[in-house]
Image (spheres, coloured by chain):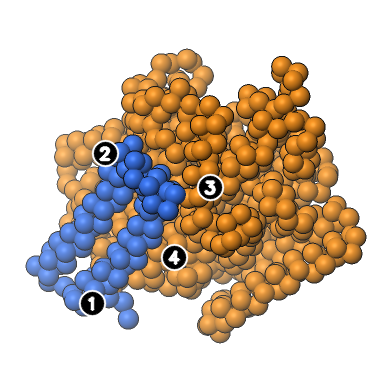
Amino acid sequence: MGMQTSKSFVDNLPKIYGGYAGGFLGFVILLAILEQMGVPNKIIGYCFVFLTIGVYAYIGILSRTSVLSEYYVAGRVVPPFFNGMATGADWMSAASFISMAGGLYLGGYGALGYVLGWTGGYVLVGVLLAPYLRKFGQFTVPDFLGVRYEGNAARICGVIVLFSASFTYIVAQTFGIGIITSRFLGIPFEVALFVGLLGILVCSMLGGMRAVTWTQVAQYIILIIAYLTPVIWLSTKLYGFPIPELTYGQALNDIADLEKKLGIVKPHIAAYVDAKGQFSWVEFNNFWALTLTLMIGTASLPHILMRYFTTPNVRDARTSVGWSIFFIFLLYFTAPAYAAFAKREVYANVIGQQISQLPAWVQNWSQVGGLLTIKDGNGDGILQLSEFIINQDIIVLSMPEIAGLPYVISGLVAAGGLAAALSTADGLLLAIANALSHDVYYKLIDPKASTVRRLVVARVLLVGVAIIGAAVASTRPAGIIQMVAWAFSLAAAGLFAPLVLGIWWKRTTATGAIVGMMSGFLVCVFYLVGTRYFDMPLWFGIRNISSALFGLPVAFIVTWAVSLMTQAPSKEMQDFVDSIRTPKGELAWLKGQAHE
Amino acid sequence: MAQLSPAQRDAYWAKTSRLMWIIMGWWVFFSFLIPAFAVQLNTITIAGFPLGFYMAAQGSLISYVVLCFWNASAQNKIDQEFGVAED
C-alpha cells in the first residue's frame, strides 16, 4: 500500500484477509497448545489483547496517507463485500457483542425489539439513503445538508445533531474498552483506558477512513469468530448439531418446561407481558416504538452513513448495504441462542441446587465483583431464583465456561469484545473529527486551507476528541452509559427527515429543512431530559429510549409545512436533486458551490 | 446529469419510487405487522420455536437481508433499462 490505494491491493483483498483469518485461527490453536502445556491464563489474556491490537496498529500504520480523499473516504475503492464487513464492525459495539445476549436472557421476547431495531434500519439505509449519498460523493453527512439546503446554517445544524448523537456513544465505547482491557490484563481501569485509547488512535490517526476501513475488516473477522465459536460448541455438545440458531428451539422447549417446574410467571417467549405475565398494551406500544426508533436511528447515524461514501460507485453502495446487513445478521440471529442456552443452563443446573454444589462457572464468576451474586436469603442452603442475581454482560463472557471450553476461548471472546468496541469507537471518532475538521474548520473557518494544513487539523482534532472522550469515560459517568441509547433517538429526530426529504421531495426548502430538523431534535431532547432529570410523566407510557417517536413526526410535519410556506427551491436546485437521483452522469452543481 | 429527457427522467423516478414503496411495504410487514401478532403466532410451534418468537428473532432478520439484495438487483435492472447504470 502506497500513498494511493492501488488496484492490485484491492484485487488481492480476498487473499490478504483469507490469509489473515487463517493466521488468526493458527494463533488461537497455538495458544490452546500453550495452555495445555501449562502457560498461565494471565499470559494467554495478554497475548490476545496485545497481539490483536498489534495487528490493528500494523494495518493502521501501513494505511497512512497524505491524500485528502484517502483520508476522508478511503479513496472510494472499497469493494461492497469488504465494506459490508467494515460496516458490520463499525456497527456492532461492545453493547451488541457483550450485553445484548444478556439483555435477551433477562428480557425474553421483549428484548427482541433490539434485535429487530438494530437490523431493520439497513433496509432504510439501502433504499432511501445510501445510493444517493454515494452519488453526492462528498466527505461527510453535514456536507450533504450544507449543499442541498444551500448554506452553512443547515451544515451547522447537522454538525450539532451529529456531535450530540455520536459523542455520548463514543464515551460509552471507550468505557467498554477500559472494562474489557482491565479485566483481561488485570490492570487498573484508568490505565486500561489509556491502553485502549492508544488502540483507537493507532488505527485511525495516520490513515483516517482508509486505515479505519481496513482495520474494521480485520476486526470483524475476529469478532465474528469469537462470537460464534463458544455457542456452536455448546450446541454440538447439547444437541449434537453445530448450528445453534436451529437447535435453540429445543432449548426454548426445555426452558418452557423448567419455567412451569420453577413457577415462573413471565415466560421467556411470551410477547408483550408485564412482570406478572399478563398482556400489557404499554409493553406492546413500547416494543414497536423501540423498534422504529432504533431502525430510523440506524439510518441516521453519520458513522454508518459515511461508510457508503467509500464504495467505487452507486451500484456498489447498494450491494454493500446487502453485505452489511448479512454480516450483522450473522451475529444478531445468534444472540437469542446465547440467551436460550444460558437460561436453560441456569434453570436446569443452578436454580434449586445446593449452594455448595453449584457448577464451576457460577462459583468462578461469583468471585468477580458485581457480575453474579448469590445470596442465600432464607439460609436453607438451596439457591432460589430470587437469590440469584446476574449482570447481563455475563452471558457472553461466561459461555466458554458453561460450554466447558478451555481458557483460551475466554481469551478469544475478550479479543472479540475488544474488536467490537475498538471498531465502533474508531468509526465514531472519525465521524466526529471529520465533521469538525471538514465542515467546521475547512468550510466555515478557513476555506483556503492547503491540503497539508487540512490533514494536520483533521489529525489534531481526532486526537483531541479521543482524549476528551477518554477523559469523560475515566470519570465512569453512569448517566452517559445510559445515554447511549439516546444517540439513536437524537440522530433519528434530527437527521432522518432532512436527509430523506432532501432526496425524495424536491419541494423541501432550506428554511423548511432547518426549522424542521431543529424542532424535531429539540422535541426529542425535551422529552429525554424532562423524563430523565425532571420527573416529567411519560407520554402514552412510551419510555424515553424511544423519544424519537415524538421528535420524528414533528420533524417531518414542520419541514413539510414550512417548505410549502416558503418559496420553492430554484430550478438549479431541482436539477441538482435530479442529478443525485440518477446513478450515471455528473452532478449538476449550483454555481458558486465549492466542492471536491 | 445523464442524457435523459424530462419525460424519461420522470418515468425513471416513477419506477424507482414504485420499487421503494414495495420494499418499504415488506419492511413494514416484517417489522411491525408480524410482531403485532406475536401473541397469536406463538401458539404455533415449529421445531421447538414458537412462531412469533422465531419471526422476531430470525425470520424478519432474514427478510431484511433478502430485501436489501433484492432492492440492489431490482434497482440495477431499472438503471439498465433507462441507460443510467454506471459503466
Q: Which residue is tagged 4?
A: A323
Q: Which chain is orange?
A: A
Of all chains, the one bearing label 1 is B
Asked if the residue under mark 3 is in contact with the one under mark 2, i.e. CB atoms within 8 Å, the reply is no
State the image quarter where residue A373 is shown.
Answer: top right
Task: Give the chain ID for the blue colour.
Answer: B
Which element is circle 4 on?
helix
Q: CA distance from mark 1 to mark 4?
A: 22 Å
Local SS, label 2: helix
Q: Residue furthest left?
A: B7
In the shown orientation, is residue A153 left or right of residue A102? left
Q: Is residue A219 above or below residue B33?
A: below
| Rendering coords of residue A419 (x, y %) | 65, 56
Residue at image mark 2: A556
Q: Mark 4: few, some, or many residues within 10 Å (few <14, many ≥20)?
A: many
- Disc marking residue A244: none
Above/below status of A482 relative to B25: above
Looking at the picture, do discs 3 and 1 lie on one chain?
A: no
Q: Is residue A215 left or right of residue B7?
A: right
Res B18 visible: yes
What's the residue type where badge 2 is placed? Phe
- Mark 1 highlights which residue? B80
> How far apart are the alpha carbons under marks 2 and 4?
30 Å
Question: How far, Cα to Cα, is label 3 from label 1?
Answer: 48 Å
